[in-house]
Amino acid sequence: MQNIASKISANIIYADMSNLAIDTSKISNSIQYKYALYDKNHVKLAGNIDIKVDINQAIQKIKGDYVLVDSSPRGHLGVFHIAIQENSFKKIRTELLEDIIFYFILIFALISLVGYYLANLFIDPIINERRKLNTFIKDTTHELNTPITAILMSTGKDAPLTEKNMQRINLSAKRISEIYKDLVYLFLQDNKKIHEPTMIYLDDVIKEQLEYFQAFATKKKLTINSNLERTAFKIDKESFIRMFNNVVSNAIKYNKIGGEISVSLKNHTLIVEDSGIGIKKDRLKDIFKRYYRATKEQGGFGVGLNIVYHICRTYGIKIDVKSVESQGSIFTFKLPKEEKL
Protein backbone atom coordinates (compact mmCIF):
# COMPACT_ATOMS: atom_id res chain seq x y z
CA MET A 1 0.00 0.00 0.00
CA GLN A 2 2.92 2.38 0.71
CA ASN A 3 4.12 1.96 -2.86
CA ILE A 4 0.67 2.89 -4.16
CA ALA A 5 0.52 5.95 -1.91
CA SER A 6 4.01 7.04 -3.01
CA LYS A 7 3.04 6.65 -6.66
CA ILE A 8 -0.09 8.79 -6.21
CA SER A 9 1.94 11.39 -4.31
CA ALA A 10 4.50 11.52 -7.12
CA ASN A 11 1.75 12.04 -9.68
CA ILE A 12 0.24 14.87 -7.63
CA ILE A 13 3.61 16.62 -7.28
CA TYR A 14 4.31 16.19 -10.99
CA ALA A 15 0.87 17.56 -11.89
CA ASP A 16 1.41 20.57 -9.65
CA MET A 17 4.78 21.31 -11.19
CA SER A 18 3.26 20.95 -14.67
CA ASN A 19 0.29 23.16 -13.87
CA LEU A 20 -2.09 20.25 -14.40
CA ALA A 21 -5.15 19.22 -12.43
CA ILE A 22 -5.47 15.97 -10.55
CA ASP A 23 -6.90 13.21 -12.79
CA THR A 24 -8.89 11.23 -10.18
CA SER A 25 -10.36 8.83 -12.75
CA LYS A 26 -6.85 7.90 -13.86
CA ILE A 27 -5.90 7.21 -10.25
CA SER A 28 -9.00 5.03 -9.69
CA ASN A 29 -8.33 2.99 -12.82
CA SER A 30 -4.63 2.47 -12.09
CA ILE A 31 -4.97 0.94 -8.61
CA GLN A 32 -6.99 -1.91 -7.14
CA TYR A 33 -7.44 -0.25 -3.75
CA LYS A 34 -9.82 2.42 -2.54
CA TYR A 35 -8.16 5.82 -1.94
CA ALA A 36 -8.90 9.35 -0.71
CA LEU A 37 -7.10 12.70 -0.87
CA TYR A 38 -7.32 15.10 2.09
CA ASP A 39 -6.46 18.77 2.66
CA LYS A 40 -4.68 20.17 5.69
CA ASN A 41 -7.97 20.24 7.62
CA HIS A 42 -8.50 16.54 6.98
CA VAL A 43 -11.36 17.24 4.59
CA LYS A 44 -11.68 14.72 1.78
CA LEU A 45 -11.02 16.27 -1.60
CA ALA A 46 -11.46 13.23 -3.81
CA GLY A 47 -11.49 9.45 -3.74
CA ASN A 48 -13.80 6.53 -3.10
CA ILE A 49 -13.13 5.72 0.54
CA ASP A 50 -16.51 5.99 2.30
CA ILE A 51 -15.39 5.40 5.89
CA LYS A 52 -14.06 7.94 8.41
CA VAL A 53 -10.26 7.82 8.53
CA ASP A 54 -8.08 9.07 11.38
CA ILE A 55 -5.48 11.09 9.46
CA ASN A 56 -3.18 11.25 12.49
CA GLN A 57 -2.73 7.47 12.54
CA ALA A 58 -0.42 6.09 9.86
CA ILE A 59 -1.75 2.49 9.95
CA GLN A 60 -5.21 1.62 11.21
CA LYS A 61 -7.80 -1.11 10.89
CA ILE A 62 -11.37 -0.03 10.18
CA LYS A 63 -14.25 -2.54 9.77
CA GLY A 64 -11.87 -5.34 8.96
CA ASP A 65 -9.88 -3.37 6.36
CA TYR A 66 -6.39 -1.92 6.80
CA VAL A 67 -5.97 1.80 6.00
CA LEU A 68 -2.61 3.54 5.39
CA VAL A 69 -2.24 7.31 5.69
CA ASP A 70 0.62 8.96 3.77
CA SER A 71 1.54 12.67 4.10
CA SER A 72 4.18 12.89 1.37
CA PRO A 73 2.23 15.27 -1.01
CA ARG A 74 3.03 18.13 1.40
CA GLY A 75 0.28 20.43 0.13
CA HIS A 76 0.85 20.11 -3.62
CA LEU A 77 -2.44 20.94 -5.35
CA GLY A 78 -3.91 21.33 -1.88
CA VAL A 79 -3.37 17.67 -1.01
CA PHE A 80 -1.74 17.04 2.33
CA HIS A 81 -2.68 13.43 2.98
CA ILE A 82 -3.36 10.29 0.98
CA ALA A 83 -5.35 7.37 2.46
CA ILE A 84 -5.23 3.89 0.92
CA GLN A 85 -7.85 1.32 1.99
CA GLU A 86 -6.73 -2.28 1.51
CA ASN A 87 -9.84 -4.38 0.92
CA SER A 88 -8.30 -7.25 -1.07
CA PHE A 89 -7.95 -9.46 2.04
CA LYS A 90 -11.68 -9.23 2.65
CA LYS A 91 -12.30 -9.94 -1.02
CA ILE A 92 -9.93 -12.89 -1.00
CA ARG A 93 -11.52 -14.19 2.18
CA THR A 94 -14.99 -13.86 0.63
CA GLU A 95 -13.87 -15.57 -2.57
CA LEU A 96 -12.15 -18.31 -0.58
CA LEU A 97 -15.27 -18.85 1.50
CA GLU A 98 -17.37 -19.01 -1.66
CA ASP A 99 -14.93 -21.52 -3.18
CA ILE A 100 -15.00 -23.64 -0.03
CA ILE A 101 -18.80 -23.67 -0.02
CA PHE A 102 -18.91 -24.46 -3.75
CA TYR A 103 -16.43 -27.34 -3.53
CA PHE A 104 -18.07 -28.65 -0.37
CA ILE A 105 -21.43 -28.80 -2.16
CA LEU A 106 -19.76 -30.36 -5.22
CA ILE A 107 -17.93 -33.00 -3.16
CA PHE A 108 -21.06 -33.69 -1.12
CA ALA A 109 -23.05 -34.14 -4.34
CA LEU A 110 -20.40 -36.48 -5.78
CA ILE A 111 -20.23 -38.50 -2.56
CA SER A 112 -24.02 -38.71 -2.52
CA LEU A 113 -24.10 -39.93 -6.12
CA VAL A 114 -21.33 -42.46 -5.50
CA GLY A 115 -23.03 -43.56 -2.29
CA TYR A 116 -26.35 -43.96 -4.08
CA TYR A 117 -24.67 -45.93 -6.87
CA LEU A 118 -22.81 -48.20 -4.45
CA ALA A 119 -25.94 -48.68 -2.35
CA ASN A 120 -27.85 -49.80 -5.43
CA LEU A 121 -24.90 -51.91 -6.53
CA PHE A 122 -24.76 -53.84 -3.26
CA ILE A 123 -28.34 -53.64 -2.02
CA ASP A 124 -30.18 -54.41 -5.27
CA PRO A 125 -28.75 -57.96 -5.54
CA ILE A 126 -29.75 -58.60 -1.91
CA ILE A 127 -33.26 -57.30 -2.56
CA ASN A 128 -33.52 -59.38 -5.73
CA GLU A 129 -32.30 -62.51 -3.94
CA ARG A 130 -34.75 -61.91 -1.12
CA ARG A 131 -37.57 -61.45 -3.62
CA LYS A 132 -36.54 -64.67 -5.38
CA LEU A 133 -36.34 -66.48 -2.05
CA ASN A 134 -39.83 -65.29 -1.09
CA THR A 135 -41.15 -66.52 -4.43
CA PHE A 136 -39.30 -69.79 -3.94
CA ILE A 137 -40.87 -70.32 -0.51
CA LYS A 138 -44.34 -69.63 -1.90
CA ASP A 139 -43.77 -71.98 -4.84
CA THR A 140 -42.35 -74.67 -2.56
CA THR A 141 -45.38 -74.40 -0.30
CA HIS A 142 -47.64 -74.75 -3.32
CA GLU A 143 -45.63 -77.69 -4.67
CA LEU A 144 -45.90 -79.52 -1.34
CA ASN A 145 -49.54 -78.59 -0.87
CA THR A 146 -50.66 -80.28 -4.10
CA PRO A 147 -49.42 -83.84 -3.36
CA ILE A 148 -50.25 -83.57 0.35
CA THR A 149 -53.83 -82.57 -0.50
CA ALA A 150 -54.06 -85.49 -2.93
CA ILE A 151 -52.89 -87.92 -0.23
CA LEU A 152 -55.35 -86.52 2.33
CA MET A 153 -58.23 -86.77 -0.13
CA SER A 154 -57.29 -90.34 -1.02
CA THR A 155 -57.03 -91.46 2.62
CA GLY A 156 -60.10 -89.74 4.05
CA LYS A 157 -62.79 -91.57 5.99
CA ASP A 158 -65.12 -91.73 3.00
CA ALA A 159 -62.42 -92.36 0.38
CA PRO A 160 -62.49 -95.96 -0.90
CA LEU A 161 -59.13 -97.69 -1.18
CA THR A 162 -59.36 -98.14 -4.93
CA GLU A 163 -56.54 -98.74 -7.36
CA LYS A 164 -56.93 -95.17 -8.62
CA ASN A 165 -56.58 -93.76 -5.11
CA MET A 166 -53.57 -95.99 -4.45
CA GLN A 167 -51.97 -94.70 -7.64
CA ARG A 168 -52.69 -91.11 -6.59
CA ILE A 169 -51.11 -91.73 -3.17
CA ASN A 170 -48.09 -93.36 -4.81
CA LEU A 171 -47.56 -90.47 -7.23
CA SER A 172 -48.01 -87.86 -4.50
CA ALA A 173 -45.57 -89.62 -2.20
CA LYS A 174 -43.01 -89.83 -5.01
CA ARG A 175 -43.47 -86.14 -5.76
CA ILE A 176 -42.91 -85.20 -2.11
CA SER A 177 -39.84 -87.43 -2.08
CA GLU A 178 -38.43 -85.68 -5.16
CA ILE A 179 -39.05 -82.24 -3.67
CA TYR A 180 -37.38 -83.29 -0.43
CA LYS A 181 -34.34 -84.74 -2.20
CA ASP A 182 -33.91 -81.62 -4.32
CA LEU A 183 -34.13 -79.34 -1.29
CA VAL A 184 -31.69 -81.46 0.69
CA TYR A 185 -29.25 -81.58 -2.22
CA LEU A 186 -29.55 -77.86 -2.86
CA PHE A 187 -29.38 -76.45 0.66
CA LEU A 188 -27.73 -79.13 2.78
CA GLN A 189 -25.06 -80.49 0.47
CA ASP A 190 -22.35 -78.52 2.31
CA ASN A 191 -23.45 -79.88 5.69
CA LYS A 192 -24.20 -83.48 4.86
CA LYS A 193 -21.62 -86.18 4.39
CA ILE A 194 -20.00 -85.78 0.98
CA HIS A 195 -20.22 -88.98 -1.04
CA GLU A 196 -17.10 -90.02 -2.88
CA PRO A 197 -17.62 -90.57 -6.62
CA THR A 198 -17.72 -94.23 -7.59
CA MET A 199 -17.73 -95.95 -10.95
CA ILE A 200 -21.33 -96.77 -11.80
CA TYR A 201 -23.16 -98.00 -14.86
CA LEU A 202 -25.32 -95.11 -15.94
CA ASP A 203 -27.60 -97.26 -18.10
CA ASP A 204 -28.63 -99.30 -15.06
CA VAL A 205 -29.39 -96.16 -13.04
CA ILE A 206 -31.36 -94.65 -15.93
CA LYS A 207 -33.47 -97.80 -16.29
CA GLU A 208 -34.31 -97.69 -12.58
CA GLN A 209 -35.33 -94.03 -12.76
CA LEU A 210 -37.41 -94.49 -15.91
CA GLU A 211 -39.38 -97.18 -14.09
CA TYR A 212 -39.82 -94.70 -11.25
CA PHE A 213 -41.23 -92.09 -13.67
CA GLN A 214 -43.44 -94.51 -15.56
CA ALA A 215 -46.45 -93.80 -13.35
CA PHE A 216 -46.12 -90.05 -13.98
CA ALA A 217 -45.79 -90.64 -17.72
CA THR A 218 -48.82 -92.93 -17.78
CA LYS A 219 -50.93 -90.29 -16.06
CA LYS A 220 -50.23 -87.87 -18.97
CA LYS A 221 -50.36 -90.67 -21.56
CA LEU A 222 -46.72 -90.08 -22.48
CA THR A 223 -44.53 -92.55 -24.34
CA ILE A 224 -40.96 -92.90 -23.07
CA ASN A 225 -38.48 -94.41 -25.53
CA SER A 226 -34.96 -95.32 -24.46
CA ASN A 227 -31.83 -96.45 -26.27
CA LEU A 228 -29.14 -97.11 -23.69
CA GLU A 229 -25.59 -98.21 -24.35
CA ARG A 230 -23.55 -99.82 -21.58
CA THR A 231 -21.74 -96.83 -20.05
CA ALA A 232 -19.59 -96.56 -16.94
CA PHE A 233 -18.84 -93.21 -15.35
CA LYS A 234 -17.26 -92.12 -12.08
CA ILE A 235 -19.79 -89.98 -10.22
CA ASP A 236 -21.73 -89.85 -6.97
CA LYS A 237 -24.82 -91.92 -7.72
CA GLU A 238 -27.24 -89.59 -5.91
CA SER A 239 -25.83 -86.62 -7.83
CA PHE A 240 -26.43 -88.34 -11.15
CA ILE A 241 -29.96 -89.29 -10.09
CA ARG A 242 -30.66 -85.64 -9.14
CA MET A 243 -29.33 -84.49 -12.51
CA PHE A 244 -31.22 -87.05 -14.58
CA ASN A 245 -34.46 -86.90 -12.60
CA ASN A 246 -34.75 -83.12 -12.82
CA VAL A 247 -34.39 -83.19 -16.60
CA VAL A 248 -36.86 -86.06 -17.05
CA SER A 249 -39.26 -84.51 -14.53
CA ASN A 250 -39.32 -81.32 -16.61
CA ALA A 251 -39.77 -83.35 -19.79
CA ILE A 252 -42.90 -84.88 -18.25
CA LYS A 253 -44.20 -81.73 -16.54
CA TYR A 254 -43.93 -79.50 -19.61
CA ASN A 255 -45.00 -82.10 -22.15
CA LYS A 256 -48.35 -82.25 -23.86
CA ILE A 257 -50.91 -85.00 -23.29
CA GLY A 258 -49.97 -87.99 -25.44
CA GLY A 259 -46.48 -86.61 -26.09
CA GLU A 260 -43.15 -88.43 -26.27
CA ILE A 261 -39.89 -88.50 -24.37
CA SER A 262 -36.72 -90.00 -25.81
CA VAL A 263 -33.70 -90.96 -23.69
CA SER A 264 -30.47 -91.91 -25.46
CA LEU A 265 -27.10 -92.93 -23.98
CA LYS A 266 -24.37 -93.52 -26.55
CA ASN A 267 -20.67 -92.71 -26.87
CA HIS A 268 -20.62 -91.15 -23.42
CA THR A 269 -23.40 -88.76 -24.44
CA LEU A 270 -26.76 -88.62 -22.68
CA ILE A 271 -29.63 -87.03 -24.60
CA VAL A 272 -33.11 -86.33 -23.21
CA GLU A 273 -35.60 -85.09 -25.80
CA ASP A 274 -39.26 -84.19 -25.31
CA SER A 275 -42.18 -82.98 -27.41
CA GLY A 276 -43.31 -80.38 -24.90
CA ILE A 277 -43.98 -76.66 -24.95
CA GLY A 278 -40.34 -75.70 -25.48
CA ILE A 279 -38.47 -72.69 -24.13
CA LYS A 280 -38.34 -69.21 -25.62
CA LYS A 281 -34.99 -68.44 -27.22
CA ASP A 282 -34.39 -65.34 -25.11
CA ARG A 283 -34.94 -67.34 -21.90
CA LEU A 284 -32.53 -70.19 -22.62
CA LYS A 285 -29.60 -68.29 -21.11
CA ASP A 286 -31.40 -68.01 -17.75
CA ILE A 287 -32.81 -71.51 -17.25
CA PHE A 288 -29.91 -72.65 -15.06
CA LYS A 289 -30.21 -69.73 -12.62
CA ARG A 290 -31.52 -70.53 -9.16
CA TYR A 291 -35.24 -69.81 -8.65
CA TYR A 292 -35.69 -69.03 -12.37
CA ARG A 293 -38.81 -70.40 -14.03
CA ALA A 294 -39.19 -70.14 -17.80
CA THR A 295 -42.97 -70.40 -17.51
CA LYS A 296 -45.59 -69.91 -14.78
CA GLU A 297 -48.06 -72.24 -16.45
CA GLN A 298 -46.80 -75.35 -14.65
CA GLY A 299 -45.68 -76.01 -11.10
CA GLY A 300 -42.12 -75.97 -9.85
CA PHE A 301 -39.92 -73.60 -7.90
CA GLY A 302 -36.97 -73.02 -10.21
CA VAL A 303 -34.16 -75.00 -8.59
CA GLY A 304 -34.11 -78.20 -10.63
CA LEU A 305 -31.98 -77.02 -13.55
CA ASN A 306 -29.76 -75.07 -11.17
CA ILE A 307 -28.98 -78.39 -9.48
CA VAL A 308 -28.33 -79.93 -12.90
CA TYR A 309 -25.94 -77.11 -13.76
CA HIS A 310 -23.91 -77.46 -10.55
CA ILE A 311 -23.63 -81.23 -10.88
CA CYS A 312 -22.42 -80.90 -14.46
CA ARG A 313 -19.85 -78.32 -13.43
CA THR A 314 -18.66 -80.48 -10.53
CA TYR A 315 -18.03 -83.53 -12.72
CA GLY A 316 -16.89 -81.80 -15.89
CA ILE A 317 -20.01 -82.70 -17.87
CA LYS A 318 -20.70 -80.43 -20.83
CA ILE A 319 -24.36 -79.52 -21.19
CA ASP A 320 -26.11 -78.15 -24.25
CA VAL A 321 -29.77 -77.16 -24.62
CA LYS A 322 -31.73 -76.69 -27.81
CA SER A 323 -35.39 -75.77 -27.71
CA VAL A 324 -38.15 -74.67 -30.07
CA GLU A 325 -41.41 -73.24 -28.78
CA SER A 326 -44.39 -75.61 -29.14
CA GLN A 327 -42.07 -78.37 -30.43
CA GLY A 328 -39.96 -79.39 -27.47
CA SER A 329 -36.47 -79.35 -25.97
CA ILE A 330 -33.28 -81.40 -26.28
CA PHE A 331 -30.84 -81.65 -23.37
CA THR A 332 -27.43 -83.08 -24.31
CA PHE A 333 -24.85 -84.14 -21.70
CA LYS A 334 -21.33 -85.01 -22.88
CA LEU A 335 -19.44 -87.02 -20.28
CA PRO A 336 -15.65 -86.85 -19.97
CA LYS A 337 -14.38 -89.97 -21.75
CA GLU A 338 -11.37 -90.42 -19.50
CA GLU A 339 -13.72 -91.91 -16.91
CA LYS A 340 -14.57 -94.80 -19.19
CA LEU A 341 -13.69 -98.29 -17.98
Image (tube, rainbow, N blue to C red):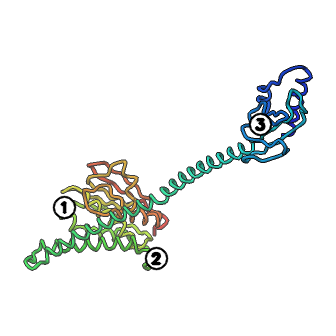
**Mark 3 / mark 1, whichever is N-terminal:** 3
Residue 153 drawn above or below residue 116:
below
Residue 86, horizontal then vertical, whole percent: 77, 41
Does 78 sit left or right of 179 as displayed?
right
Q: Quadrant of residue 255?
A: bottom left
Residue kind at label 2, given as amino acid type = Glu
**In front here: 273 or 36?**
36
**In front here: 54 or 280?**
54
- Residue indicated by mark 3: 33
Q: Residue lying farthest right?
A: 17
**In front here: 126 or 304?**
126
Q: Tags 2 and 1 in contact by the CB under 8 Å rule?
A: no
**Mark 2 / mark 1, whichever is N-terminal:** 2
Residue at left offset 26%, top offset 49%: 326
Residue kind at label 1, given as amino acid type = Lys
Residue kind at label 3, given as amino acid type = Tyr
Residue at left offset 37%, top offset 56%: 287
Residue 165 drawn above or below residue 56:
below
- In three-dimensional space, the C-alpha distance between marks 3 and 1, rounded to whole angstroms, equals 99 Å
Q: Is residue 229 visible?
A: no
**In front here: 14 or 191?**
14
Q: Residue lying farthest top?
A: 19
- In three-dimensional space, the C-alpha distance between marks 2 and 1, rounded to whole angstroms, equals 37 Å
The quarter of the rendered structure image containing the C terminus is bottom left
- Residue indicated by mark 2: 196
- Residue indicated by mark 1: 220
Residue 208, horizontal then vertical, whole percent: 29, 71
